[in-house]
Amino acid sequence: MKQFLHFIGGAFVPSDSGKTFENRNPIDNSLIGLVSEGGRTEVEAAVAAARAAMKGPWGKMPVTKRAELLHAVADEINRRFDDFLAAEVADTGKPMAMASHIDIPRGAANFKMFADVIKNVPTETFEMATPDGGEALNYAIRKPRGVIAVVCPWNLPLLLMTWKVGPALACGNTVVVKPSEETPATATLLGEVMNKVGIPKGVYNVVHGLGPDSAGEFLTSHRDVDAITFTGETRTGQAIMAAASKGLRPVSFELGGKNAGIVFADADFEAAIDGIARSSFVNCGQVCLGTERVYVERPIFDKFVAALKVRAEAMKPGVPSDKATGIGPLISQEHRSKVLSYYAKAKAEGATIVTGGGVPDMPGELASGAWVQPTIWTGLPETASVVREEIFGPCCHIAPFDSEDEVVALANDTPYGLCTTVWTQNLGRAHRIAGQIDVGLCWINSWFLRDLRTPFGGSKQSGIGREGGVHSLEFYTELRNVCIKYA
Ligand code: NAD
Ligand code: 6OD
């Protein structure tokens, strides 16, 4: 039986209280191991270790040396690729083909990319005349913020954690990570990597635990945490923002969404079907950027619905190691209950169930896993729950539209604003739409195509701030202006 311990000050430690919770594999609900459940004592110790490292070797280290160490972290993740892959796949049940192409390589790349950004981005300088006829020089320097709390979700555990830890460390901060209670493994494994490559003790800390009245809340309300970066549900973001208001700590939030996909009749049909099948169903629909509302121009509506049905039905549920597996399980039984409650609501609200709507028959022990069928609905009004609320499952509602203005209004009619994916071959229309949809990310004829130098984040209730490339520096550093009057 595996034990997932906290990683504090460079050492793996259990909770003082001896409390643990279970980590289960969603493919068959089997027990993977026991996770130490952190409380105030562990949060206190981790924040103190992070503060000490900030004042000590890490705070004093030149940026070139820091960058070198972060490259070594990435190289060591790649060297232990199979360990990370096995850990991520056991926690999430996702197909190995996906985790080995996305989760683990990106987990490593996030360290190299931000190490290179911080080494190469200059600050500004201004010469000025002074009132006494003399001269002064202004220049800005970037200083780390200090101890950063990193609170993570379960859908892309290593990728989304390192997306925050990479830039935080590159900028010279230290971190205390609170991984999701569903996916403790890769954050723990990263502790071994940090020690192996010589990251000073206390720079990277992990406290396992739950959210409210547990490690998550204790960490985000800890007054010696200088800033909080969070990915997760909008409702949780509100609770964390309230905690951050005590002491006026800055936040960076990547939150929920109800993203629209828009397909015009002039789109490359096969490419659009591919794109929407991926954006609606990949990772069993558990991608914040996923498409749960699809709008298709009326002349191709029936053909599109029929083709997406074929794609959904071809997604074979199965174990991660099977190359034929098209879709894994949801993260947990609890999340499956939530997704199935929406499947029931869609039915009750009068949806036409094009495909899915239930649980697939799985053999043997897999029958205890958190499986659901990829599901497509049509025929619901825009007011229906499954059209308005984030489900975070492999499902979408498809509705027809007749004009560009109409579809822009439909896409924008949501409190969220994370992303959209638009399919058209009309270049003018693509640019027009990109300027009109209230989102942080607009993909045209593509989806989840990532250049890590670009700004990433959501508008409206989908987030606060942007990370990526130089934009991460805005959150993970503070600019200090130095003004020198020449003698
Ligand atoms: P969640 O909000 O339930 O949990 C995220 C983390 O917050 C977990 O570590 C949890 O323990 C912690 N937490 C919960 N309550 C807390 C509290 N009161 N104080 C401090 N910490 C607390 O989210 P989830 O279910 O893990 O992830 C799914 C959600 O994340 C979806 O809404 C999805 O859209 C969103 N998400 C957004 C992005 C993005 O980039 N915008 C990316 C991935 C996931
Ligand atoms: O690619 C990324 O950097 C990123 N933050 C992806 C988020 C995916 C959400 O589930």
Image (tube, helix red, strand yellow):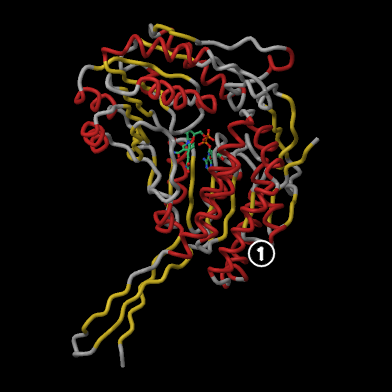
Say which quarter of the image contains residue 99. top right
Residue 377's spot in the image, x, y percent? 41, 12
Q: Residue at x 37, y 11 (%)?
A: 378
Q: Is mark 1 within 8 Å of ligand 1?
A: no
Q: Which sits in the foreground, 16 or 200?
A: 200
Q: Nearer the viewer, residue 221 or 301?
A: 301
Q: Is residue 177 above or below residue 173?
A: above
Q: Compared with residue 412, is residue 186 higher up or lower down, i.e. above or below?
A: below
Looking at the image, residue 471 sits to the left or right of residue 27; the answer is left
- Residue, x 57% and y 48% (percent of image)? 218
Residue 211 percent location from the top left of the image: 57, 39
Determine the residue positioned at 60% across, 23% down: 328
Residue identified by numbered label 1: 200
Q: Nearer the viewer, residue 302 or 125?
A: 302
309 in relation to 229, above or below: above
Q: Nearer the viewer, residue 477 or 425?
A: 425
Report which quarter residue 305 is drawn in: top left
